[in-house]
Image (spheres, coloured by chain):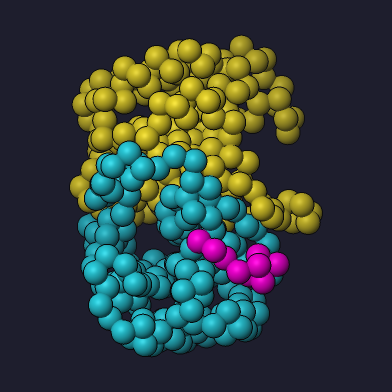
Chain colours: A cyan, B yellow
Amino acid sequence: MIIVFTGNGKGKTTAALGQAVRAIGDGKRVLMVQFIKGPWKSGEDFFLEKFNIPHSAFNIIKTGKGFVGILGDSLPIEEHKRAAEEGLALARGEIESGKWDIVILDEINNAVSLNLISREEVLGFIQVLSSKLQALVLTGRDAPQEFIDLADLVTEMRDIKHPFEGGVMAKRGIEY
Amino acid sequence: MIIVFTGNGKGKTTAALGQAVRAIGDGKRVLMVQFIKGPWKSGEDFFLEKFNIPHSAFNIIKTGKGFVGILGDSLPIEEHKRAAEEGLALARGEIESGKWDIVILDEINNAVSLNLISREEVLGFIQVLSSKLQALVLTGRDAPQEFIDLADLVTEMRDIKHPFEGGVMAKRGIEY
């Protein structure tokens, strides 16, 4: 099945992460390939390390170069594009290896909407590779309509209220 | 901070679960108190067992009696109400013990909208107890407006597409 978590609200990646935990508890093997997100570690990475979760049961691979075009990003867009292409190629290889039951392409929707990778390429990927998995999960705001059309389950996370509005900064371990 | 995940779409409990994983990785102690959900185990419980996650770092306590008024539920509503009251009392004791940084009241919004527990009582709970935590997370559809008004971060999970529509049953380890 194909699952899409999209929208401008908090909870897309965490919902995928929660779903991963649930699936792993049930004996499934889950890979999260993170697009855009750079090499720095976040709470989920520390979690895997701290509790010695075997990489064969749950792995998180970051393939991005960090925020694109904001927050002091000075990388040429080509670098971001190459990273996204490499991320997709890595995901393809992992799926074809048969090692995973569920694969999450985290922020892939953003990678498409930021033109790091073409929607046609990802669409072809989904069409060919989702059948080799129990679930393929796509996260990120601005999911293309074509992804939604292909998906079995789509949730839009809508931002009703967000602490940045009130000037409060994101809290480590809570928001990232 | 007070966080609300509401709406009719998939991803509310899993977002809270993902947030828990992230926070635990960052050294925080997280308790999820589940309302309505009965004693049967789901993927997240098996996950905690499988990887020996210490209960002091992350615990999930189910306080409900199962679905209310549907799927063959034959319990008197008073039993559900008592279970919800006991769940809230348990959560209060746990928060007051100082053992937790983050507490998730899973499906508490439903417990209120199903009149298992009064909105005034939960409102009082939030107002008094949220300040003792780094985050208090409330999940479930139909969050009362008063909870949204009090919250710092609110995401509505909107159902755009759902497999039940197509007659496909929920898959264990993926949807629950």
Q: Is residue A80 visible?
A: yes
Quarter of the image where one finds residue B80: top right
Q: Residue furthest right?
A: B167
- Name the residue at 54% across, 42% down: B156
Quarter of the image where one finds residue B140: top right
Indicate the quadrant containing the N terminus of chain A: top left, top right, bottom left or bottom right. bottom right
Quarter of the image where one finds residue B81: top right
Q: Position of residue B27 (x, y in %)?
A: 20, 47
Image vertical order of residue B18 relative to residue B3, above or below:
below
Image vertical order of residue B102 relative to residue A138, above or below:
above
- Name the residue at 24% across, 50% down: A172
Q: From the viewer's perspective, tell me whether residue A137 is left or right of residue A2.
A: left
Q: Position of residue B59 (x, y in %)?
A: 34, 38
Image vertical order of residue A35 relative to residue B45, above or below:
below
Q: Position of residue A108 (x, y in %)?
A: 48, 71
Q: From the viewer's perspective, tell me whether residue B122 is left or right of residue A65.
A: right
In depth, the one of A161 and B25 nearer the eye is A161
- How many numbered marks are there? 0
Q: Is residue B90 visible?
A: no
Q: Is A147 a magenta residue?
A: yes
Q: From the viewer's perspective, tell me whether residue A18 is left or right of residue B92.
A: right
Indicate the quadrant containing the C terminus of chain A: top left, top right, bottom left or bottom right. bottom left
Range of the magenta residues? A141-149
Image vertical order of residue A124 relative to residue B133, above or below:
below
Q: Is A46 a magenta residue?
A: no
